[in-house]
Amino acid sequence: MTGDRGPSRRLGLGSRLALAIGLAVAIVILVAGLAVQVAVVERFDAYLADVRQERYAEVVAATATLVQEQGDLRLRKQDLRRLAVLAGGLLVLRDVDGNEVARIDSLPGTGGAGAAAEPPVDLPITVDGQLVGTLEVLPLTGTAPAGTTAAPAVFRESTVQILALAGAGVVLASILVTFLLARRLTRPLRGLAVAARRVEGGDLAVRVPIPADAESHDLAVAFNSMAEGLGRSEALRQRSASDLAHELGTPVTVLTGRLQALADGAVPPDPEHLAAARDAAEEVRRLVGDLQDLVAAEGAALRRSPSRVDLRDIVARAAASSQALFDAEGVAVDLSGVDAGAPVEVDADARQLERVLVNLLTNAATYTPGGGTVSLSVSRQESIAQVRVRDTGPGIPGEHVGHVFERFYRADPARGRTPGRPGGSGIGLTVARDLATANRGSLTVESTGPTGTTFLLELPGSE
């Protein structure tokens, strides 16, 4: 149970992707927002500084005018108050030696309160080009130069707050959008996970919808192909088990019956009955060997050792190894179509190709009447190497042609049971077809009729 709950506590791919993208977008937005905020604040502060400097210039000009009119730095209190309001701060008027001449410690409307917002600003006072004193201004918090309002400062603070709130909102929105997008993008993966668990549970008929996007499309197609392959493999396994039981059933029953009859004394243990029991046992052994060959052929692609070989040599070796069978069947072998012509080279596993041809020759010898002929030819059609095996048998009935490569299939079951004849299990052509496929080739029935059947083996030729 703990193992089952563990994966559910882990973030899925969609969640991790959403968090990663959302975090990246949030960082970008935060950096961009901070940069914008700093730029706006700097530009706005520069604007306010320019406005203040303009007002300070007006204060200096007004102070110089008053000093020139009165002929003294000792300005009247009401004049100083007007200057303080114009400057938006406290004032200290000093002479050229730095001695204090007059001071304004409060502004009208501030109740005598207010703290210095910035360091004091010294404004030189000149009259007719001669320095006569210095006006020291201490700007106060919450005040503004005369002719202006506190709106710029309020706007500045509001702008900072709006930018901060907008940045936070955009960050949250980006995380939400990326999370929803990631969930949508990974929806096919979640569907695949569910389907994979169903396949694991034995439901091989499950398929997933094919999404429109290329990556998920390819993944879904691959999964469906895999599920179809597993379904075919399972059906083949079940069919093989059924075929095996059926094929072994007859010879095992015969063997068991004969041995039981011998054990019960129902028949004497003479050479005839012992030979019949031996033939039944040999049938079982041969069938087991054929099944082993079939299993080996199905995995031939993994075990093949390709090399460049001349098909004419492979055909000649196969014919030589099958000669004893042809002699026993009274069937001639015609190699005139093999010996003539230039080499026909292919890149394939020589032993597997020889087994293909031996199986074809065995099949031809089995179904060719005594006195008949099996002809072999090797040729090259453009980039394809071809081997034809033609017999002079009765041909394959039309309804059976499409089944000759199926395992355990026999067009003439009775003949397959004839004692002493090779083949007959319906596996030889299946093995030959699988080995041909393993070597990137194909094996087909090219033609069949009353005068004989031709099998065609095609392989990609060497460059």
Image (cartoon, grey):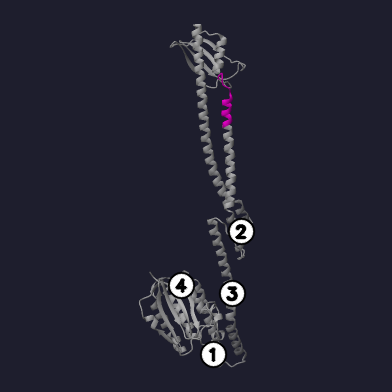
Q: Label 4, label 1: how many angstroms apart (C-alpha)?
A: 42 Å
Residue 272, by quadrant, is bottom right
Q: Which residue is mark 4?
A: 441
Question: Reading the chain from its start, which is encountered first: label 2 or label 3?
Answer: 2
- Which residue is found at the position 55% from the left and 44% from the top? 23
Question: Reading the chain from its start, which is encountered first: label 3 or label 4?
Answer: 3
Q: Residues within 10 Å of mark 4 (few under 14, many from 20)?
A: some
Q: Amino acid at mark 1?
A: Ala
Q: Label 2, label 1: how many angstroms apart (C-alpha)?
A: 59 Å
- Which residue is found at the position 59% from the left and 41% from the top? 172
Is residue 234 in view from this perspective?
A: yes
- Which residue is found at the position 46% from the left and 77% from the top? 456
Q: Amino acid at mark 2?
A: Val
Viewer-proximal residue, 24 or 160?
Answer: 160
Question: Reading the chain from its start, which is encountered first: label 4 or label 1?
Answer: 1
Based on the picture, tell me whether residue 151 belongs to the magenta stretch. yes
Q: Secondary structure at mark 1?
A: helix
Question: Residue 239 has which mark?
Answer: 3
Q: Amino acid at mark 3?
A: Arg
Q: Which residue is mark 1?
A: 275
Residue 460, x across and y down, in percent: 42, 71
Is residue 11 in view from this perspective?
A: no
Residue 182, x across and y down, in percent: 57, 50
Q: Secondary structure at mark 4?
A: loop
Residue 224, x across and y down, in percent: 57, 63
The answer to whether 77 is drawn above or below residue 171 in the figure is above
Q: Label 3, label 1: how many angstroms apart (C-alpha)?
A: 33 Å
Question: Residue 206 has which mark?
Answer: none
Q: Secondary structure at mark 2?
A: helix
- Marks 4 and 1: which is nearer the front? 4
